[in-house]
Amino acid sequence: MSRSSTLESSLFKEGVPILEERYRLFVSPDSMEAYLVKSGSGPALVPEDIPQLFLELKARGVVYGLLDEPEEGRGGRLVVARGKPPLPGKDARIELLVDLSRGPLKEEKPDRVVYRELNTLVCVELGQPVARRLPPGLGEPGMDVFGTPVPPLPGRDISFNYGSGLEADELLLRAKTAGVLIFENESLSVSPVYVLDSDVDWSVGNIHFCGERLVINGDIKRGFSLKVKGDLEINGSVEDNVQIEVSGDLFIRGLIQGESVLIRCEGDATIGALEYAQIEVSGNLTVLDYLLQPYCLVGKNFRLLDGLGVVLGGKCLVGGSAEVYILGNEAHVRADFRVGYDPLILGRLAELKERQKTMERQERDLRGGLEKGLRLLKKGGLSPAQKGILKKIRHLLENLRDDLRQLILEEKLAREELKRLRKNTLRIEKRIFPGVHIGIADADFSIVTRLAGGTFFLSEKGLEFRATKGE
């Protein structure tokens, strides 16, 4: 055994004499503390002993954590050096990147609480980070009284606990599909299809959903809103002052009722019955019962042949063709129903017509001025300044005629689109009543007598009606 090892062994066990054998020097088993124990009858430690004490401590290998003044320890010990314990590493942890808390939304600016926003459905987009793994810390090494580094204990590691709809790499947990983020049994998952078995009311709040499909087995109560990126199915009714926005297809089984209801659907929509409400559908609209004083804007085709099958009052603007069982009623309530409706094309045509009228009027004025100037020029009655004005008029007229030719070409293209709109038809299955005003593209017609089933269409003669055989 080397002298150094023998010395350290003595320090741990019986100690070694120091300061002319007045004290014995010991080191704790973990080497984190050096202390003196009085031996013999010599004088106690005084400040003048400190320099010599430091020299003897270092000579015996105690080189780190020397105290400027010894401190009293338990059992009459005098602690003369303390090591630096290692700091263990922090344990790994999972940090949620999505707010899963429930309750009213608190806005800082302005300082208010929104009680309709309860964060009931927490949705994530495809690829969105959901949680982050913070790796365990390595810790910080310490030092014993001999100047030997003491390695720290690293923190405990942890892994993501997740189910379907999620995928993880070393540090991030991401959504591999859009849907509702669910936390159950200490595990996260994402469901692209979600079923809500309740009304949308004060206990649920406004709905913000993204995924494949949201099913609501209840009613949408007054004043609440739904914003759905995906398909929406409502197996209940919709009360007044409700707003619904759907990026996919829409199905509403019950009654939609209220003048302040606004429904927008970017896909196809199927609804039960509607009273006084507004619905805008980019695709096809199918109604399973009736419409009472509606405002319907439909991008493609319209169908109402089931249930009562009646459109009573209101306005329906349909981009494609339409099939209706009964249009109007015995009271001759006014209803506007138009197929082949495209506000962009019809508006563009109207704008082009107005511009053409204006440009033709300008062209006549310029042409008249030019002709008058040319006559005066022929007679030699124009000054140099007037000749310059005449040249400018000629230039303006040429540019105007170029613009007018371009305008006529644009109008021709728009009229080709109008021809497509004019091919749409309105088919009445059972009956249409007086008071109904119908239109196909840019053609209009008011019904003044009751008609049985048949089809309205446009021909070269104008708007015509062909009765169904057997009616």
Image (spheres, helix red, strand yellow):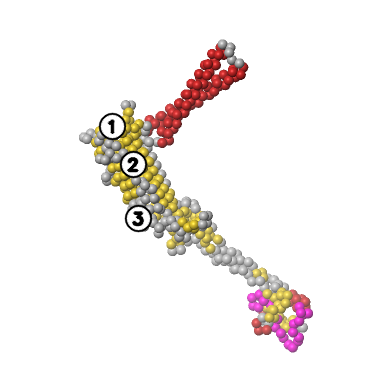
How far across and how far down the image is residue 369, in percent? 52, 19
| Disc 3 target residue | 218
Q: Which numbered disc, 1 or 3, marks the residue that appears first in the sequence?
A: 3
Kindly give the residue lying farthest to the bottom in the view shown.
41
The amino acid type, in three-letter code, at marker 3 is Gly
User: Do callouts 1 and 2 mark residues in contact (Cβ within 8 Å)?
Assistant: no
The quadrant in which the C terminus is found is: top left
Which is closer to the viewer, label 2 or label 3? Answer: 2
34 vs 338, nearest the viewer: 338
**Residue 429 spot, x, y in % from top left:** 26, 38
Q: Label 1: which residue?
A: 465
Between 398 and 157, the residue placed more toward the observer is: 398
Answer left or right for 424 relative to 115.
left
Residue under label 2, please give it.
314
Is 400 placed above or below 191 here? above
Q: Residues within 10 Å of mark 1 (few under 14, many from 20)?
A: some
**In the displayed structure, would residue 174 be above or below residue 26?**
above
Mark 3: few/some/many CA within 10 Å (<14, 14-19, 20+) = some
Q: Secondary structure at mark 2?
A: strand
| Marks 1/3: CA–CA distance | 43 Å
Q: On residue 403, which mark appears?
A: none
Q: Could you tell me which quadrant the N terminus lies in?
A: bottom right
Residue at 59% over, 64% down: 137
Label tally: 3
Residue 251, percent from left and from top: 35, 48
Outermost residue toward the top?
379
Residue 325 vertical placement versus 208 (above, below): above
Residue displayed at 53% across by 18% down: 370
Residue interval drawn in magenta: 28-50
Q: CA distance from mark 2 to mark 3?
A: 28 Å
- The three-letter amino acid code for the residue at tag 2 is Gly
